[in-house]
Image (tube, rainbow, N blue to C red):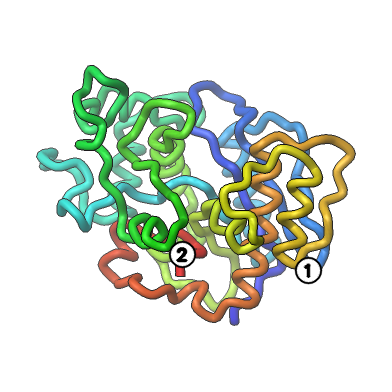
Amino acid sequence: MRQFASYVAIDWSGAKGRRHKGIAIAEARGEAAPRLIRAGHAWSREEVLEWLLRRAAEEPTLFGFDFSFAPPIIERGEYLPGETQVPKTAREFWAYVDSQCDDDDLGAASFLEQVHRRHFYFGIADGVKAGFMHFRRCDARLNAQGGRKTASAYDAIGAAQVAKASFSGMRFLHRLDGIAIWPMDPLPDHGSAVVEIYTRIYLRRAGLSGVKLRSRSDLNRALKGLGSPPARLRFEPNDHEADALVTAAGMRLLATTEPRAFEPEGLSPEIARSEGWTFGVL
């Protein structure tokens, strides 16, 4: 099984602006408790990019980001049906999204709100929400297993929406030159790699399905279920920090103990290059 020096989880944000309280970074190294990187810092997305490129060059690290690496395409044959200029593979689509946005700090709100507005749900004026709820094959697989990944990349309204984070994330991925992004790229024998993550997968593995982490005690219950020592925090973590800490520990456990981690059932070459896959959906 492939070994990494550390496992890093990034709780992402697609919010407008230059600094984002919704971004948190945690690292799990060796058998130690996961720790926050620059706790309390308001990261920019471009700052995360610079930090990641430096870290990836220093040592082999598995980085996880909690946004959809591509919209669904297998179901309908196109990412944005009816738009003839839109590519049909993830890497080409990332470049396309980046070329259409001039938002601050790798934001992508303009892509959703202006460039391709008709494909995204912003409220009842857009019609029946169910008509926008399209999912990737890995999302459908997780839902069938009871994983409750119900958000769609086309849902752009409410606290649970993932559209803005995902499309800003695609701009970010486009700029990760020289780093393998799984499964669009094969997992390399050496060096760093980037994967898509989802915190609920690791809460389920910890035996805490449906639990929302609201305190250090909740966090440490989850870490214990993942075979990790408790986090050494002197403060109560917010949602983003707790999710990052648990996910870093979960990534470490999955990557070091699960032979199917990078060879999940149902992942075909076509899905790998077009929709991608969430690390931990087996």
Give residue 126's position: percent from left, percent from top.
21, 22
The quadrant the C terminus occupies is bottom left
Q: Is residue 57 visible?
A: no
Give residue 19's position: percent from left, percent from top.
61, 25
Q: Residues within 10 Å of mark 1 (few under 14, many from 20)?
A: few
Q: Is residue 75 visible?
A: yes
Q: Residues within 10 Å of mark 2 (few under 14, many from 20)?
A: many
Q: In the image, 124: left or right of 172?
A: left
Secondary-structure class at tag 2 = loop
Residue occupied by mark 2 = 281
Disc ID at residue 30: 1
Give residue 137's position: percent from left, percent from top.
31, 60
At x 59%, y 82%, the residue is 1
Quarter where residue 62 is shown: bottom right
Quarter where residue 156 is shown: top left
Secondary-structure class at tag 1 = loop
Front-most of residues 19 and 135 = 135
Three-letter amino acid code at disc 1? Gly
Quarter where residue 42 is shown: top right
Q: Is residue 67 above or below residue 110?
A: below
At x 30%, y 21%, the residue is 123
Mark-to-mark CA distance, 2 and 1: 23 Å
Disc ID at residue 73: none
At x 54%, y 63%, the residue is 193
Count of number-bearing discs = 2
Three-letter amino acid code at disc 2? Val
Q: In the image, 279: left or right of 144?
A: right
